[in-house]
Amino acid sequence: MSKKNNHNYVPASKRAGVGQIILLCGLILYTLFCALPIILVFIAAFTDEKMIAANGFSYFPAKWSTAGMNAVLKYGKQLAVSYGVTIFITVGGTFIGLFVMSMFAYSISRKGFRLSKFLSVYMLIPMLFNGGQLSCYVIYTSYYHMKDSIWLLIFPLCVTTMNVIIIRTYIANSIPEELMEAAKIDGAGEYRTFFQITLPLMKPTLAAVGFMMATAYWNDWQNALLYITSDSKKPLQLLLVNIQKSIEVLLNSRNIPAVALAAIGGTVPQYSATMATVIVVIGPIMIAYPFFQKYFVKGLTVGSVKG
């Protein structure tokens, strides 16, 4: 009996359709699993502190309140300054780092470059061995005299070995060597080959690495805590850490003035203010991510076709 006359036979198109439906349901469940904690953070930021203390975190709070967000936004002027500092170091550090690392990765990816192997090994040494935070602090402050300098928020995270390896691998696997050889035959030097041919083709990997660098700069607070003392150079993350410490001081103090309690509604918004700080931190990153997502997909597609 042929397959067409078999009542149990399911066409391949229908089997593929069932598989796609199952995959879609699985992806929807996974998306909800990842999104629910973020949604809870936004809800908790506007939940009354007494409700959180009594019933814990809930997706359907009995009472709403803006006390937590107000506790963060009361630092309005300093918050705006810190946002400006963070945006400056994030954008500036990312562009400087991508520029330096892309040139370095291009150099060591060239087969005719004699120092390629030496520089590759030299690049790996800081990833395996380093002097630690104390030695960095002594060098930056005592020898470079860069205490309270905004450049100390940029330089330590500017170049990383793993990012250089990612860019070098992309150049070696996704940019045809014949294209560079053709440019060389046409009389193009290394600088022209890099800036006019290689660099434009590196957009997917530069966007991916740049997003990771921007996230690292945006979330960095330890360097600011060690080196920054001026309020005009204080980044957003350090300000939010100070806000949390201020709330902890209020919670641990037994002699809080009645005027201070009245100003914050009679209750220190510990949990809701914590969630509000999270919103202030992750908001710009969540907005920026969709604009970089297409470059991730493009980078994966180019790599798979080349492979």
Image: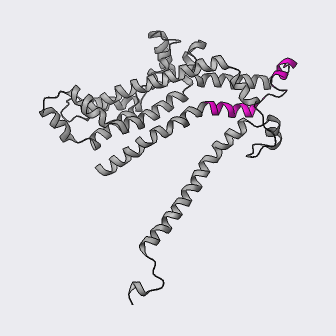
The colour scheme of the drawn protein is one colour
Quadrant of the snapshot with the N terminus: bottom left
* Residue drawn at point x = 44 percent, y = 21 percent: 155
Q: Is residue 16 visible?
A: yes
Indicate left or right for 303 with 65 as reference. left
In this rendering, position of residue 250 left or right of residue 283: right
In percent of width and height, residue 54 lies at 83, 41
State the residue in front, 8 or 240: 8
Residue 240, above or below 41: above
Which residue is most to the right?
258
- Whether 256 is among the magenta residues is yes
Q: Does 160 sit above or below residue 35?
A: above
Image side of residue 43 versus residue 4, left or right: right
Residue 84: percent from the left, percent from the top? Answer: 55, 20
Q: Position of residue 179 (x, y in %)?
A: 20, 39
Q: How many marks?
A: 0
The answer to which quarter of the image holds residue 219 is top right
For image coordinates 59% across by 56% down, the residue present is: 29
**In this picture, is 298 found above or below 261?**
below
Residue found farthest to the bottom: 1
Image coords of residue 177 (percent x, y): 20, 40
Q: Is residue 307 visible?
A: no
Q: Which residues are magenta?
A: 255-280
- Image vertical order of residue 251 relative to residue 145, above or below: below
Classified by dominant secondary structure, the portion drawn in magenta counts as helix
Q: Is residue 126 magenta?
A: no
Left or right of residue 38, residue 286 in this image:
left
Query: Residue 83's quadrant in the figure?
Result: top right
